[in-house]
Amino acid sequence: MAASYKIAVLPGDGTGPEVVAEALKVLKAAGKKYDVKFNFTEFNWGGENYKATGIVLPEDGIETLKKYDSILLGAIGHPDVKPGILEKGLLLALRFGLDHYINLRPVKLYPGVATPIRDKGPEDIDFVVVRENTEGLYAGAGGNLKKGTPDEVAIQTSINTRKGVERCVRYAFDYCRKRDKRKTLTLVAKTNVLTYASDLWERTFHEVGKKDYPDIKREYAHVDATCMWMVKNPEWFDVIVVENMFGDIITDLGAMVQGGMGIAAGGNINPQGVSMYEPIGGSAPKYTGKGVINPLAAISAAQMMVLDLGLEKMAHDIEQAVMWACANKIKNLGAGKMGYSTSEVGDLIAGKIDG
């Protein structure tokens, strides 16, 4: 009897539906090969739905999604919707409501993909960032006083709890152990300035590592130095663990190091619940409907999803097909520069898996 998985699909805005369509095409091909059935249910939450109904996320949206095995997201962001409405009302609401306390970002350069880092190749750029995803500055603590006046005060407070820090740190240690490469976990923080929060992270990092993960080497780097070393010596990193805001910054830098947003995928992970996977490049509204946007990041997000579902052989096949296309077929990852349309790229990957 074929294995079966229920997947919630949120195509979203702009080019999101176009890249998600190709990810689903690849999943169907891979499912056929491995006798796995994916049951996709699409939800139209996003900018157009908000414009039509005034609703960003239905009241039962979180509970509805909890019934699925996983979630695949296209992109959120609409030019006719004020910034912050969709991001807070949908993305952050899902992140907090589903307790996606890990943001997982592989940074891996594939053969054939150009990186702006001179003299570095696939053997040098292969690390993973584990970002805490539900605390820090994104917890939303703060406010304004005397807004709109010369005396205005704005306060945004970073919230860090021992529980939140420790569960992120433990996930990173476990991931580093399972990855089994250099077995080196680097804590990124700012201990010389942000002494309270960074002290909590550093103490937890070393206490947990010393007690339960003696096989994992522990290193530390300031966040500003990390930005420098990710460019100068990316080969130094194996797995990075980092708080929310700093993680948001360095993962975008990581996307550029690995060749651009067109190849960068991420996961919003709840190891005990339902997780959500997405390309990190955004909705790119200027390319909507033109058939030129690169779907590889969405396909790679689907690859991350099936890997976390335990479908390791399928995940390996999808990644190998993406690597093959990058090395042998696709000229450039930029929109309109690939030498293929969006759907043709999906056909390449699906065809290689069918192979």
Image (cartoon, rainbow, N blue to C red):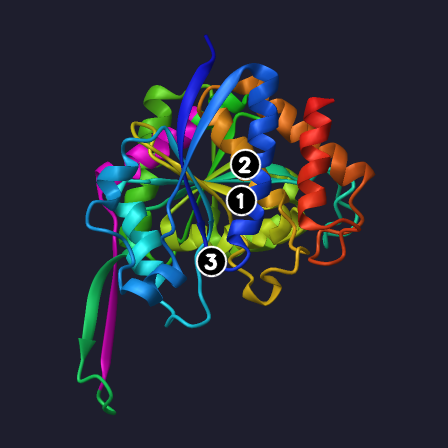
Rounded to the nearest angstrom, the CA distance separating label 3 from label 1 is: 11 Å
Query: Tag 1: Cα neighbours inside 10 Å, few (<14), some, or many (≥20)?
Result: many
Give the extent of the magenta segment.
152-174
The numbered mark at residue 13 is: 3
Q: CA distance from mark 1 to mark 2?
A: 6 Å
Is residue 171 one of those drawn in magenta? yes
- In the image, residue 60 lies at what x, y percent? 20, 45
Side of 160 relative to 82 (left or right): left
Disc 1, SS: helix
Q: Position of residue 110 (x, y in %)?
A: 71, 38
Q: Amino acid at mark 3?
A: Asp
Quarter holding the C terminus? top right
The reply to whether residue 19 is visible in this rendering is yes
Query: Is residue 320 found inside the magenta-colored segment of the image?
Result: no
Q: Which residue is mark 1?
A: 20
Q: Amino acid at mark 1?
A: Val
Dot 2 amino acid type: Leu
Residue 32 location, quadrant: top right
